[in-house]
Image (cartoon, grey):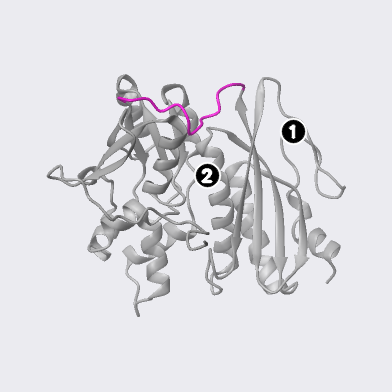
Amino acid sequence: MGEFELIRRYFDHAAAGAGVIEGIGDDCAVLQVPAGQELAVSIDTLVEGIHFLSEIPPAELAWRLIGAAVSDLAAAAAQPAWLTLALTLPKADPEWLEPFARALAECCEQQGIALVGGDTTRGDRLVLSAQVHGWVEAGQALLRKGAQPGDRVLVSGTLGDSRAGLESLLHPVSAPTQEIRWLQQRFYRPEPRITLARALRPHVHAGLDISDGLLADLSHMLDASGVGADIETCCLPLSGALAHCYPDQALNWALSGGEDFELCLAVPEAAVTTCLQLAEQQGVRLTGIGRITDVPGLRVNDAEGRELAGLAQGYDHFKESP
């Protein structure tokens, strides 16, 4: 199967969507941003053996790829619109491509995003890059900068589940429980908080999504905003499945496990109740875990108020490089 036949057979059908003047089939997609909107763009790459196990089912890989990429649009409070996809494949294998393409189309439909272009190449290992484009009202993109002393730090969902799901895949048990399977789905299928982010945007000073771990990502917000924060471990939202299956690791994974793709927000005190109510209306858990301060640095305190030291900060591709 040649490159163009591969594209035509598996991906050409997914090019329809709002604002798409020309999609797949030309040298460039031609797209129209609605009046009064700005374009938010992000790219996410998954590399076999680094970001995912070789044994991952292709359908789950499609959901994970798009979920992780679209989560960056949620972090900006942008509405998903378009996707370009680059695939490096060891071979054009229909048994892999068919379930991957089918799941990709399902995920794109769920997220309201149209596949409008991309590239395919042959290589030694599987590499997938998803570039996502979204719309956000002019001047209203949610950014990392803007957190202010006195803001509350709120996070959506529960933390540490994805890392636990990965652990259960790296060291599988003979008969996975319902809780283990749920944790694995949290790893395979992240849920971008698009609707929540857009509802909360008028009430939030700064925000991002948690991809490298709470401590690492919150530190990015603090650096961008020129502030510090105090976090209380007793307030961290942990799922029952994580606490039950991995009680000894739950706290560290919630702080540094990464790839939960939940929102982390700096919210003025006067808007906290409104944000909690909006989240409750959507059936999403939103939890206060600390406060922004004017003292630089990120401090993590236990239930007795003692600062914890020596905590892992999160994932960094090049942290071991000189």
Q: Looking at the image, can residue 5 be seen?
A: yes
Q: Is residue 135 left or right of residue 278?
A: right
User: What residue is at 48 percent from the left and 60 percent from the top?
Assistant: 188
Work out whether 27 lies above or below 228: below
User: What residue is at 56 percent from the left and 73 percent from the top?
Assistant: 54
Judged from this view, the residue extending furthest toward the left is 304
Percent across and percent down for residue 73 are: 56, 39
The image quadrant of residue 162 is: bottom left
Judged from this view, the residue extending furthest toward the bottom is 174
User: Magenta stretch: residue 226 in it?
Assistant: no
Give amino acid for label 2: Ser
Q: Is residue 138 left or right of residue 297?
A: right
Percent across and percent down for residue 81 are: 66, 38
Q: Is residue 125 left or right of residue 30?
A: left
Residue ID for mark 2: 71
Give amino acid for label 1: Gly
Looking at the rendering, the stretch of residues picked out in magenta corresponds to 138-150
Distance CA(mark 1)–CA(mark 2):
21 Å
Query: SS of the residue at dot 2?
Result: helix
Q: Looking at the image, can residue 278 be seen?
A: no
| Label 2 neighbour load within 10 Å: few <14, some 14-19, many 20+ | many
Percent across and percent down for residue 33 are: 72, 29
